[in-house]
Image (cartoon, rainbow, N blue to C red):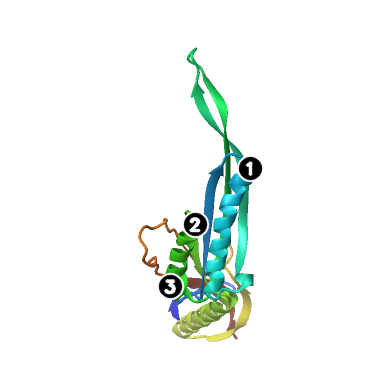
Amino acid sequence: MLTLAVPALADEEGRIRVVGRAQSESSPDFASVEVGVEGQGATPAVALDAVSRAARGVIAAAKEMGVPDADIGTTALTLQARTKAVPQPDGTVREQADGYSAGNLVRVRLADMGKLGEWLRRALDSGANRIDAIAFGLRDPGAAEAAVQSAAMKDARAQAERLAEAAGVRLGPALSITAPPRGDASRPAPYAMAKAAAPRGRTAVPIEAGRIETVAEVEAVFAIAR
């Protein structure tokens, strides 16, 4: 846990107003990745059946690696008619029907992030041809935020105590606590994003989760003891 001091002041009403700040870094404990299958067919059924078979393979690959059903979900299913531009003898261009395109997007959440690269490799082998955003996060981000808020409040009190000592007065109780400070709409974001392109070859996809930073600020007003 790292605490950072910010400017503080004593106001004319016998109070000390400070802003405490703290931040921490945590290792993510899950990875969430969306893998998709896109295909085409002459009819709606052919297009949808093609992507459905591949999507079932993607889901089966996740289950074979121990991912529970609750951590596997379909996030998008699309089916639409395709057209193509056909030049005409008179120089104009006419849109002509060109079958159908379908897509199926599956989100998988992995607690064992060491298996993420291998699962992506298996998903591609099962027919996936699209990899969307990969997200790393905390299953309990509230706990990380609460710890950092507590550290920020301790930092605020430490600042106020230093000011009171420097001014030759005694620090009184906290009169108000505002988190985050007024005018600051930012919130901690215990969530990291990364993009992955569909790789080539048959090796596991190399992915680094990195660290997740959580930041908190607390504005506190303390009384000066009489």
Residue that carries the numbered disc 2 in the rendered image: 128
Asked whether disc 1 touches disc 3, contact meaning CB atoms under 8 Å apart, the reply is no
Q: Which mark is residue 179?
A: none
Q: Quadrant of the N terminus?
A: bottom left
Q: Which mark is residue 44?
A: 1
For this rendering, which residue is in front, 162 or 113? 113
Q: Does 179 sit left or right of 126 as displayed?
A: right
Residue at point 63% right, 42% down?
44
Quarter of the image where one finds residue 200: bottom left
Gap in angstroms between the C-alphas marked 1 and 3? 44 Å
Residue 184 in sight in this render: no
- Height in image: 54 above or below 69? above
Residue that carries the numbered disc 3 in the rendered image: 211
Tag 2: amino acid: Ala
Gap in angstroms between the C-alphas marked 2 and 3? 28 Å
Quarter of the image where one finds residue 46: top right
Q: Nearer the viewer, mark 1 or mark 3?
A: 1
Q: Nearer the viewer, mark 2 or mark 3?
A: 2
Quarter of the image where one finds residue 71: bottom right
Residue 142 in sight in this render: yes
